[in-house]
Structures are given as C-alpha cells and as structure tokens.
Image (spheres, helix red, strand yellow):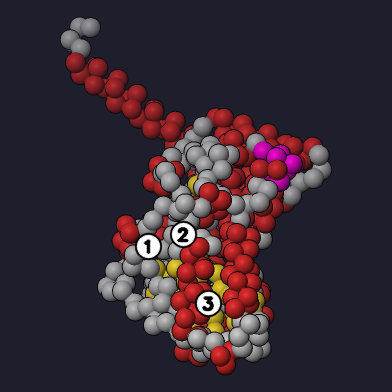
Amino acid sequence: MPSINTLDLYQLAENIKAWGKALGFQQVGICDVDLTRHEQGLQEWLDNGYAGEMGYMVEHGLKRARPAELIPGTLRVISARMDYLPPNANFAKSLKSNDQAYVSRYAQGRDYHKVLRNRLKKLGEKIRLECAELNFRPFVDSAPVLEHALAEKAGIGWTGKHSLTINEQAGSWFFLGELFVDIPLPVDQPASNQCGSCSACITICPTQAIVEPYVVDARRCISYLTIELKGAIPEEFRPLIGNRVYGCDDCQLICPWNRFAKITDEHDFHPRAHLSNQKLVSLFAWTEQEFLKKTEGSPIRRIGFQRWQRNIAVGLGNAAFDQAIVDALNHRLNELRETKEADKMVAEHIEWAITQQQNKASQQGEQNKRLTQRLIRSVEKGLPRDA
C-alpha cells in the first residue's frame, strides 16, 4: 500500500469523487480548513443571541469555524451532497390546506443523519484502502461544523441569503455531510454567489426570521420554533406558523434556483404514508406509543411526543373553525387533567388553540348573521307593498 509521499493525490481526489457518487452522493468537493473569514460573522451572530436556546452553538463558539481544532491534524474536508427532493411532493397543496399537517420535506423519510454518516464512513474506509496513513472522521450535523461555509469552499454551492447552500444545477433540496481527513488532497474552486438582487426568501419568510441577507435569527425561524425550542412557542409567532408542525420550507419553495432541483432516487428519503398528506386531527389523535412507533427511524422522533403535540395544537388553532377540531382539543385537554399527567406546556397550547377556534366560530356566526340580514333586506325590497 503506497504512502502519502508516493501517492498521486490528484488521481486520488478524482477517485474519491467517483467513489462518492457510487455511494449515492450527487456531488463531492474538497477544501482546506481555513475559515477565518467566517469567524467575525459567526461571533456577531452568537453575540446577537440569534442562536436562541441552542446552547451547543454558543458553547463551541468559534471552534465551528476551526476544523483543525475540532479534529487535530485535519488538513482537508471532503464535502458531500445528497439530494432529497421526493417525488409528488405536493408542497403548495399541503400549505393551502390549513387542516392538513405540513411536515418539512427533509423529515418525511428516514433520518438523514444515519444515511449520510454510513455512506461517509464507507467512503473513508474506501480511501483508507488506498492510503494506509489516513485518519478520517465523518460528520452530519453531529459536531460544531460550519457545513455551509465548507460546502461553498469545496465548490458544492454558494450560501444563499436564507443561509442554506444553493447549487446552480440542483437548487437547495439536498443534505450535506463532511469527511475530515489528514491528507493534503488538492482542493476545488469555491462556488461563486449567484443570488444577485433576489430577495424572495427574505420576503416570503412567515416570521421575518431572515433579519438581513445571509443572517437568520433562529428565535424567529419556524424550523427552530417547532424543532429546537423546548418550551412554549411565543404567542406572537403561533398564528404565523400556520399548519407547519415540523420545520418550514418556505424560503426554499420560493427560491428560483430550485426549478433545477432533481428528484431523489434514494428511497430512504421518500415520504412515509403516515407523515405525508395527513390531517392535523389525525396526527393529534396519536398516543405516545403510536408516535414512537410511527416516527421510528425518523428525525421527528427527537423532538418527543410533548413538542409534537404542542406543534399540532398550534396548527389546529390556526385551522378554519371545525367543531371536530374543538372536540379533539377538549378531549386531549381532559385526558391530561384526568390522568394527572398534565404537561403545562402542551395544555397551554391546547387552550390557546381552543380560544382561536372559538374566536373563529364567533366571527363565522357574525358573518352568517350579516349575510342573513342582507338577504332579508334584499327580499323585502323585492316584495310588493301589500305583501
């Protein structure tokens, strides 16, 4: 087995990209570990409190922009892209049907962390067969890694104004994973930013979480509010969340580059029937045991049953008035009280949702009353005088 000194590193880099594609990655790039130009922006983001309750972001600080501090000896990062856009996504239909639960497209299939990490590990083992001195470590959202900056530097795509990576031939519907290695592979050309003057993602964001181009205040982001936030969702954001019960795709849906997105062949990322096109009421009826069973192997499972119920309660509060919804909310609230397992956070969101439904019922009643009065006046005007 050749040593690093006798290896043709350029040929090895080409082989790595070919092996990556054979393992199911759509693109593989290589970059060095110098991310110093991102340190100031990262520190300002942390100082502004934009990380919210994500304490791990604050804890690691600038290590996120210093790969060689995370894994000493790291010389290069292999960045890999795997597309996840499923067939028959029905994005618009799900968002327009406010009684139907909207689950972010990345979360409807198998947990991508496991899929990508296993493939990256196989890629590292394949490289090690060619290079005995190799040390490697795969990462998929599992450590303080500035993945979008690395992807940009490795030529995978540029960082868009919504802070996600965009590829000019594939849009942004893809996952990223990294393989840290300690061999001096040749690096790829960084991707150039092509957002131009477009600000569609900033405009469309329901909660205005993109506070300036390339800067997202996580505390306002629906993905953060429905996934990362452990406590109560601030009331100011609840009506804006709509029927989004796990994550949000709006900034990607509106991005013009996503017209080039490709449908994934990875069956693991295809939607599970019990998570796709489901009524909010149906999901709200799950017991904790059903939740654990039906989200097995899914990223949704990590938020736990209470947050799942919290999110769906908000969605039910935002749905059009329906007595079946009110009955379901009251039933769950009574269950919490009767079993003395009341989760104050969940109960609070259910009570909020009931109030929203009652307000809508009242508004609907007033509207019906006005329509009836208008109809009576119209009929009276058309009647003869002696009628």
Position of residue 149 relative to residue 382, above or below, is: below
Q: Residues within 10 Å of mark 3 (few under 14, many from 20)?
A: many
Residue type for callout 1: Ala
Residue type for callout 2: Asp
Q: What secondary structure is found at the residue carrying circle 1?
A: loop
Q: Quadrant of the N terminus?
A: bottom right
Label placed on residue 32 = none
Q: Which residues are magenta?
A: 286-292
x 39%, y 68%: residue: 166
- Which one is nearer the viewer's eye here, 316 or 374? 316
Left or right of 272 in this view: 302: right
x 34%, y 65%: residue: 169
Residue type for callout 3: Ile
Judging by the rendered image, the residue that carries numbered circle 2 is 83
Judging by the rendered image, the residue that carries numbered circle 3 is 78
Looking at marks 3 and 1 on the same chain, the residue that comes earlier in the sequence is marked by 3
| Mark 2 touches mark 1? (CB < 8 Å) | yes
- Which one is nearer the viewer's eye here, 68 or 50? 68
Residue 49's image quarter? bottom right
Where residue 271 appears, x then y in whole percent? 52, 45
